[in-house]
Image (tube, grey):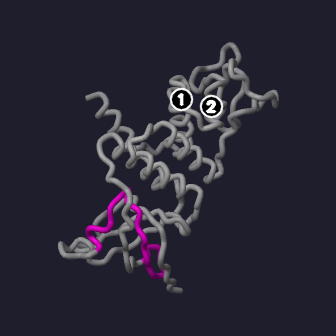
Amino acid sequence: MSKRVDGQAAYVLHLHPYSETSLVVDVFTRDHGRVPLLARGARRPRSAMRGMLMSFQPLELGWFGGGEVKTLARAEWLGGMPLLGGRCLLLGYYLNELLLKMLPREDAHSALFDAYASALRALAAGGADAPELRRFEKTLLKELGYGLTLDVDMDSGQPVVAEGEYTYLIERGPVARRVGDGDTAVVCGQTLLDMAADDYANPRTRVESRHLMRQLIAHHLGGKPLQSRRVFMELQEL
């Protein structure tokens, strides 16, 4: 059955050509999750939609249709967001790639939408990226059912101690490090407590939280590589 939706807050995640004149647009919406839309005629030079469908910019969209790919009916740019550039642009593509590869279609997560919008605003304003990226990653995993335990030792049931060292078991959470444990996901207790409080002022916390989240996301991606991370690392090497 054909369904019409209008007035949806959304962001463009990805564009790819469809025929000589049209585009398929993957969008992330607040109330409908990730939705693929057919933008008819959007590749034509004089198309009104051509300039609207920009990544990292707040949009209001309307669409109709009952199939897997809906038809985009209208797009309005809401403004108020500076364009991303340089390092922040690459980090924005990283956020988009996570959503494209991890979020099922038409699975609404309003808290994740808000976390994404907040991260984009912080990046556009030139703020420190570590807190926003970690908050977004944590929210993404929580919304997908992989919420992190950060403040309790899963073996003893006791609170994590700031001075302690812990091995983070991906399917369980932190356990006190023992002699002979591998070093693949070892973090200090202070890092875990800081992550639970969304406090990334400590340089060690920033480094260890980045490594931990990288391992967790890689696990839940099931081996799918992130192209944005590869490009970012290559540019850092240059």
Instruction: Tell me, yes or no, whether the highlighted magenta stretch contains residue 123.
Output: no
Q: Position of residue 127 (x, y in %)?
A: 43, 40
At a point 50% along the width and 43% down the height, the residue shown is 132
Q: Is residue 121 left or right of residue 190?
A: left
Report x, y in % for residue 135. 55, 43
Taking depth in this image into account, of 166 and 57 the one nearest to the observer is: 57
- Find the magenta span and give its range: 49-70
Residue corresponding to mark 1: 201
The amino acid on which the numbered mark 1 sits, given as a three-letter code, is Ala
Quarter of the image for residue 91 reads top left
State the residue at coordinates (30%, 77%): 40
Q: Nearer the viewer, mark 2 or mark 1?
A: 1
Label of residue 194 in the image:
2
Could you tell whether 88 is left or right of 161 in the image?
A: left
Res 226 → quadrant: top left
Element under disc 2: helix
Cα distance, mark 2 to mark 1? 9 Å
**Callout 1: SS:** loop
Q: Is residue 66 above or below residue 36?
A: below
Q: Is residue 132 above or below residue 2?
A: above
Q: Main secondary structure of the magenta part?
A: loop
Q: Are marks 2 and 1 in contact (CB under 8 Å)?
A: yes
Left or right for 199, reference 21: right
Q: Position of residue 82 (x, y in %)?
A: 34, 53
Q: Tell me the kind of residue under disc 2.
A: Asp
